Image: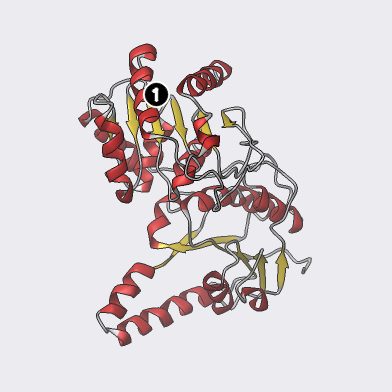
Amino acid sequence: MTPIAPRSILIIRLSAIGDIIMASALIPALRGAYPDARLVWLTDEANVGLLRNNPRLDRVIVWPRRRWRQLLKARRYRECFGEFLALIRTLRSERFDWVLDLQGLLKSGLWAFLSGGRQRIGLGSREGSQFLMSRVISREVESVRIGKEYLKLACELGIEPGRFNMDVAVSEQEKTEADALLKAAGIAGAFAVIAPCTTRPQKHWFDDRWSELSARLTSAWGLPVVMLGGPADQTRAQAITARAPSLVDLTGQTSLGQCAAIIQGASLLMGVDTGLTHLGIAMQTPTLALFGSTRPYLDPGDAVASVLYEPLPCSPCRRRPTCGGEFTCMRLLTVDKVLAAASTLLEGND
């Protein structure tokens, strides 16, 4: 690694939402270490809302993956190729000294290579992307802290990470839009947020328990409950609201920035292993994470959050459950246990 301080740094993390949120802790760490460097992030167009308002980033460059797929499907090959070349020119015009590929996949490694960066550092690079890097840093680290692999990368780069808090910013416009959404839904004053949906069924808690939890938060605690998620989560959200009519369902109705603003204003967030739960921690909202088949962290890095996790001999099974669909680890998380943990969390943050 060159001892000369980089004048320009490109971070590449194209997806997914949770990983971008956790990786955002590198932004203040790099800005603190190199205050005069130009700091740029390349990401998929779907995730720009997490990054575009961050004052510590000089630029967010968009990879228009969805648009290019549409162009290719429409056989507009020349137009797609022209935009591809234009993105390469945009990246190379920045003359990056460091390119940090945080995703470590072939798709991200190719963009690191095409950027023309002088030093290309890959985090856990695989799928052939390791051959496109100047240096590869292993993701493996003995830690239960949130964002542990990104913290390791900072240390390997010789950066003093400090508290290494995640760094997501929302605009005043997004705050105004979030307030309008809540007002239209009848929410005034304190409220709680639930984030029950994610990509894999073994990471889910149970619909009837979310419904009961929401009803009890409102009846016993006086907290109206807002449910957040993406458009793909709406069917499951409807099943949860069917058992809890007072639950405010905003699933699929917010941008990422509006979602972050709603979470920032909440008194409490409870969710499974999904990006919105990690976003709760990033926004300094009291957050209770319900983990089972996956356990990305046990230490959320801040007293504002805590993890509820009942390990079994098979835990964490990740993508290969052995319980025959019982999801016993999540079944052990009863509504009473969740409410008790949430109460302890809120008392500790008074």
Residue 184 drawn above or below residue 122: above
Counting from the top left corner in percent of width and height, residue 330 is at: 51, 35
Looking at the rendered structure, the secondary structure element under dot 1 is helix
Residue 201 drawn above or below residue 336: below
Counting from the top left corner in percent of width and height, residue 239 is at: 28, 37
| Residue farthest to the bottom, as pictured | 78
| Residue farthest to the front, as pictured | 324
- Report the front residue among 277 and 304: 277
Quarter of the image where one finds residue 77: bottom left
- Report the front residue among 193 and 242: 242
**Residue beneath disc 1:** 213
Counting from the top left corner in percent of width and height, residue 53 is at: 43, 49
- Report the front residue among 61 and 324: 324
Image quarter of the N terminus: bottom right
Asked whether residue 314 is in view, the answer is yes
Asked whether residue 284 is in view, the answer is no
Residue 95 drawn above or below residue 23: below
Instruction: Give the residue type at disc 1.
Output: Leu
Quarter of the image where one finds residue 44: bottom left
Counting the numbered discs, the total is: 1
Task: Say left or right for 26 vs 63.
Answer: right
- Kindly identify the residue that appears in the image at 32 percent across and 51 percent down: 232
- Kindly identify the residue that appears in the image at 54 percent across and 72 percent down: 94
- Kindly identify the residue that appears in the image at 73 percent across and 51 percent down: 141
Counting from the top left corner in percent of width and height, residue 303 is at: 61, 27
